[in-house]
Image (cartoon, coloured by chain):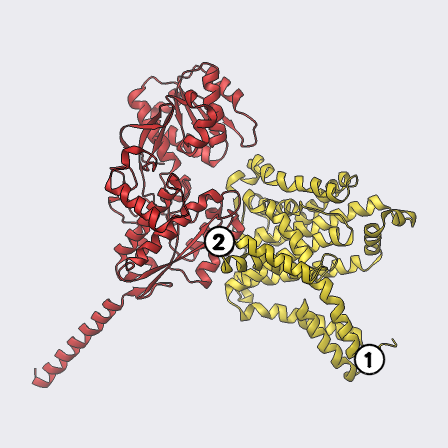
Chain colours: A red, B yellow
Amino acid sequence: MTVKQTIVTGLSAAGLMLVAGLAYAAGQYGPGASESEIKIGNTMPYSGPASSYGIIGKAEAAYFDMINKQGGINGRKITFISRDDSYSPPKTVELVRQLVEQDQVLLLFSTLGTPPNMAIHAYVNENKVPHLFLATGADQWNDPKRFPWTVMWLPSYSIESHIYAHYILKNLPNAKIAVLYQNDDFGKDYLNGLRDGLGDMAAKMIVATQSYETTDPTVDSQIVALQGSGADVLLTVAIPKFAAQSIRKVYDIGWKPTHFLSSVGNGVGTTMKSAGMEKGIGVISATYLKDPTDPQWQDTPEYKEWLAFMNDHNLSASIADAQSVVGYSYAQTMVAVLKACGDNLTRENIMKQAASIHDLKLPMLLPGVTLNTSPDDFDPVKQMQLMKFDGTTWRRFGDLISGAGS
Amino acid sequence: MTKNSVIATDLLAAGRYAGVNIDAWRWIGALAVTALAAALPFTLSNYHVFELTLVMIYAIAVLGLNILTGYNGQISLGHGGFFAAGAYTAAILMHRYGVPYWATIPPAAVICFGLGVLFGLPALRFEGPYLALVTLAMAFAMPQLLKYFDTWTGGQQGINLIKPLPPPELGIDRDRWLYLVVLVVLLLAMRVAANLLHGRTGRAFVAIRDHPIAAAAMGIHTARYKTVAFGISTLFTGVAGALSAIVIGFVAPESFGLFLSLSFLVGSAIGGIATIGGAIVGGFFIEFVPNFASDISDAAPWAIYGLAMLLLMYAMPRGVVGSLGPLVAQLVRQMLPHRAEK
């Protein structure tokens, strides 16, 4: 090799390294991402019948705002475009197309509600847009084979009923179970999850099921029929109005089953108060979040950090509203995934990172709850803790239980 | 429509020199506008094409309401319910029976005509605000009914539809193809509405609106015409609903809330309630003003929406086309002075 050749070779090698280095420093970007910005799209019902959920979107916006003020993610600021779909699926389709095609967002985050997400499910997967951390608990979202661009977040309904099944098998092995459920996919997810969780015992243990329609005036006759089956365990899968009716009727007819209540309808203010606080004593439900009103947490650094966030950045929301905790935790999950992406902000890498969350702990989830995803499992939160109503508030008991889902 | 009129005006002005009669120019104008509308999607992004497709769908629905409320004087706050009926007819036929999308439009029209006539019968006994209340019941009831018959409607979950593919030999994408399909239906709907309203039936509708007793005295079968007006109106709105199911690719009870019915009435009033062209302005209003409002203010988009509505109604109480239409017509007359003797 002549000197000249050596120099040429050396120079080319240096050149290559320089180019590679530049490429590395410059990063790789999908639509909506650059050296200075990451664009995130979202739809929320800020108006209309489901507008109370809008608090989640406000907490997310406030959290991203705080991150931006602290310097962003690897120096990039988050532009969070959150639009109001009023919980109307056609509007969601339109807004999501606007976000993807006009605003050119890198990804969609925390789009809220089962019907709105149904309406955009095919579109986002066809166009290969990350559709991350949906704010809905239906089981169908966790389907990486058919919908590899859609990742959920909440413990799915069947995970929760798996947890009840686990408890029943362990503590009430001779239980005769009755189920009251809402006659739609929400109710059926719970029922199927329970059957699945009980396994071989399901046919023997579940002695009666009754369903109601959301248009029914009451569930009184269903409760009476379920009592007639001789069951000693009752699972009520209902939204607050019917959950309250169920608790009240069970108490009034003097039936004393071990009563499980779906987390969907377990609000103290919404369900337990209208049922009558003393009538709900002993009802069992499940949770994965820290209740912001629970005095137990108020001296912990995690709670103080959350409180500081609420006081400095999310002033319009109430401290007592658990929806803010939900939004805060969603946003933290998003930030963790973006940090993991480093300088490779392509849509493919976003999905890769979203599908490999490993033992992520979030400050406002119950201690011990960790988020995990894998290429076959797109549901990050799978652990819940049981809790019992004591006449004024929910008291958690036992260990965290993880449900496998179905 | 204003664009249409402007172009028509130019052509009319030119017609004076070219020595071609006005009707021919009118046709040429209509063809030119149609050609422009058909060419438009090829200059726009897919998203804008999709938005304009929705505008045209809302325009067809509003046109239905204009026939009923504008020409026949019956107020309906329940047209969202008929829109839903059309949408679900299309969705169920496509999803359960594999009917091709274009073939679902005639059944949707027939079913919604039938529903409208049935609804129009009791409506005969009510007038003004009372009729508005009766139709409001339709808007309230529809989402719940859809959830109740869940074996057909998919309940809360709705029905996901496979979006229709354009004929491959055309070599255009889905958004543009659907735009053209909806455009054809819109033009057809406007033509049918014009024929109907400018003829004997339309005169009967208007006579009943203006003075029902005098109309009856002149031998107009008031009850029959009012019922027919209801049926035709809901037919248009139902067809729009079917198109929306096809274009959106998804139906769920939440898609057809009370607000949809109110939007139709707002669009109808803003565009010009007793006009045909006003429906297009109404479609634009329904589609763009809410988005525009939330771009201006995150905090109070509906206040902005309300303000836009107030300003438009204050400036143009007969709606955009209802108020500007006569002005434009007068301008045309002034530009064609020697045509006055005709």
Tag 1: amino acid: Pro
Front residue of A189 and A304: A304
Quarter of the image with the N terminus of chain B is bottom right
Task: Characterize the local packing of mark 1: few (<14), some (14-19) or many (20 or more) Cα atoms within 10 angstroms.
Answer: few
Please state the horizontal and vertical placement of residue B286, each as a whole percent of the image.
60, 56
Quarter of the image with the C terminus of chain B is bottom right
Q: Is residue B261 above or below residue B137?
A: below
Q: Is residue A326 above or below residue A219?
A: below
- Find disc 2 in the rendering and name its residue: B299
Front residue of B43 and A323: A323
First in residue order: circle 1 vs circle 2: 2
> In the image, A208: left or right of B112?
left
Front residue of B19 and A271: A271
Q: Is residue A373 visible?
A: no
- Find disc 1 in the rendering and name its residue: B337
Residue at the spot 47% in from the left edge and 36% down from the top edge: A185
Element on which disc 1 rests: helix
The subunit carrying tag 1 is B
Please state the horizontal and vertical placement of residue A268, each as a whole percent of the image.
41, 30
> In the image, A296: left or right of A124?
left
